[in-house]
Image (cartoon, grey):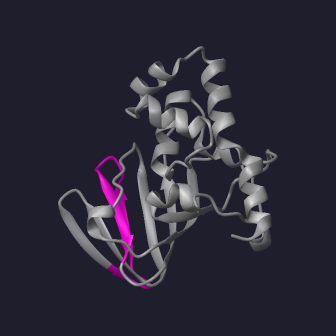
Amino acid sequence: MPSHIKNELASLDLGRQIRNLRNQRDLTLKDLSKLTGLSKPNLSQIENNLVTPPIATLINIATALGVPIGSFFQRSSQETNVVVVRKEDRYGIAKGPHISHIGYQYEPLAYPKVDKSMEPFIVHMEKREAKEIVYNNHRGEEFLIVLEGTLEFRYGDTVFTLMEGDSLYFDSSIPHGYRGLTGTVKTLVVIYKPA
């Protein structure tokens, strides 16, 4: 990973942000565990920046803490109707040996915008075995389009194979997960979470 991306990820300090929000709300790890369905040890690892949570986990944590998921990615907020994020200003999250279990890296595309209903990401998924798929579910809807490679998408008990240019739109409250079938797969994912 390039050093500027490592520095950007470190500057986000997701764990500290989550701990601060939890403490501001007078919640214990046990309280947050009950609200999110995540184990106390997992939350502790996240708060200590030992693991980087998948997107759906961040959504669950953000919902439990009453903040938009985008608040975790803001270096500085822009209270405008439009934001531009240049390619060279994007940064990747969830890339490294201590978080390889996730199987993907995601780049938030609209992180400076506050109070948004959609969260667009570029997601780079690794080739993985079916048993390694991490399933998520959260309130809202998602749209996904495959930009490069071939992707296997699992939605409940249904399996879809998507190729470059294919897209899908789905209710994200149903457990879902995906994996790359051909090397690294690049997708655009837009998550809509109603207020």
Q: How many marks?
A: 0
**Image x and y of residue 159, in percent:** 22, 69
The quarter of the rendered structure image containing the N terminus is bottom right
Q: Is residue 45 visible?
A: yes
Outermost residue, top direction?
26
Q: Is residue 60 left or right of residue 62?
A: left
What secondary structure characterizes most of the magenta part? strand
Q: Is residue 29 left or right of residue 9?
A: left
| 188 is higher (above) or lower (below) than 117 | below
Q: Is residue 82 visible?
A: no
* Residue that appears at 56% across and 40% down: 46
| 162 is higher (above) or lower (below) than 4 | below
**Image x and y of residue 7, in percent:** 78, 57
Outermost residue, left direction?
157
**Image x and y of residue 129, in percent:** 31, 71
User: Is residue 124 one of those drawn in magenta?
Assistant: no
* Residue that appears at 36% across and 56% down: 134
* Residue that appears at 62% across and 37% down: 48
Q: Quadrant of the rendered structure where residue 33 is?
A: top left
The magenta-colored residue range is 162-180
Q: Nearer the viewer, residue 161 or 37?
A: 37
User: Is residue 168 one of those drawn in magenta?
Assistant: yes
**Image x and y of residue 54, in percent:** 49, 52
